[in-house]
C-alpha cells in the first residue's frame, strides 16, 4: 500500500465524443478497489432529471461560472456549446488528493487535451473511441434525452473530435463493453502503480 507521506497524486483523463460510452466505462473503473475518486466538474447547464448537485456536476449559473473564471478558480474550462460552460475547479483536485486518491476526469476532448497539458507526466489521457459514427448516432437516439437538432450538433462535434485521437496517451475502442472495461482498468493500474 502507498505510504501517505510519499503520496503523489496522479490524474486519469477520460475523453470521448458524446455517446461513446465514456461515463459507463468510468463507472466500471470506479467500481474497482483502485485508489481513485471522481472529479466533479462544474457546468452552466441545468441538471438533467437524474443528476445530483455535487455528485454529477456542480451546477452554476452562467454568471457564477464567469465569476469563477475571473477569480482563476479553474484548472481548465471550455464553452462546449454556446453559453454552455464546463470546467475543472482547482479545489476539486485538492479535495481528492487530500484523500490520498488519484483523480479521474470525465471531460470533453478539448478539456482532456488542456488537462494533459496542465498535468503533463502526472496525467494519463484516454480517448474512448466509438466503433463508428453510425453506432454513436444510434446510441444518442436511444438516450431519448436529445432532440434531432441536438443529435445533429453532437454528431458534427464528434466527427471533429475524432481528429484529436493522436493527442491522447491511450485509445480504447468501445465496441464490446466487457473488453473496453478490462482495457481501461488494466491501463489505469499500470499507470498508478
Image: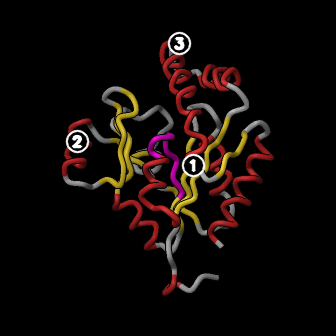
Residue 166 higher or lower than 17, as above or below: below
Q: Earlier in the sequence, mark 3 or mark 2?
A: 2
- Residue at horizontal 26 percent and vertical 37 percent from the top: 61
Q: Residues within 10 Å of mark 2 (few under 14, many from 20)?
A: some
Which image quadrant is residue 162 in?
top right
Q: Residues within 10 Å of mark 1 (few under 14, many from 20)?
A: many
Q: Which residue is mark 3?
A: 148
Q: Earlier in the sequence, mark 1 or mark 3?
A: 1
Q: Which residue is mark 1?
A: 14
Q: Which residue is mark 2?
A: 66
Asked if the stretch drawn in magenta spans residue 95, the answer is: no
User: In 3D space, how far apart are the residues under numbered discs 2 and 1 (Cα atoms)?
Assistant: 25 Å
- Where residue 148 sits: x, y (%)? 53, 12
- Residue at horizontal 19 percent and vertical 48 percent from the top: 70
The mark tally for this picture is 3
Does dot 2 land on a helix, a strand or a loop?
Answer: helix
Amino acid at each position: 500500500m502507498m505510504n501517505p507521506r510519499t503520496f503523489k497524486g496522479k490524474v486519469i483523463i477520460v475523453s470521448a465524443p458524446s455517446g461513446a460510452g465514456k461515463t459507463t466505462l468510468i463507472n466500471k473503473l470506479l467500481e474497482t478497489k483502485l485508489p481513485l475518486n471522481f472529479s466533479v466538474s462544474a457546468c452552466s447547464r441545468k441538471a438533467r432529471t437524474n443528476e445530483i448537485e455535487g455528485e454529477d456536476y456542480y451546477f452554476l449559473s452562467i454568471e457564477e461560472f464567469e465569476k469563477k473564471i475571473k477569480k482563476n478558480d479553474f484548472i481548465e474550462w471550455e464553452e462546449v456549446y454556446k453559453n454552455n460552460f464546463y470546467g475543472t475547479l482547482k479545489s476539486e483536485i485538492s479535495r481528492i488528493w487530500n484523500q490520498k486518491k488519484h483523480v479521474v476526469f470525465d471531460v470533453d476532448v478539448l478539456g482532456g487535451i488542456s488537462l494533459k497539458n496542465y498535468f503533463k507526466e502526472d496525467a494519463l489521457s484516454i480517448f474512448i473511441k466509438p466503433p463508428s459514427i453510425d453506432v454513436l448516432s444510434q446510441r444518442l437516439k436511444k438516450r431519448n434525452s436529445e432532440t434531432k437538432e441536438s443529435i445533429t450538433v453532437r454528431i458534427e462535434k464528434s466527427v471533429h473530435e475524432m481528429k484529436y485521437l493522436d493527442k491522447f496517451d491511450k485509445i480504447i475502442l468501445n465496441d464490446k463493453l466487457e473488453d473496453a472495461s478490462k482495457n481501461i482498468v488494466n491501463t489505469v493500474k499500470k499507470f498508478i502503480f
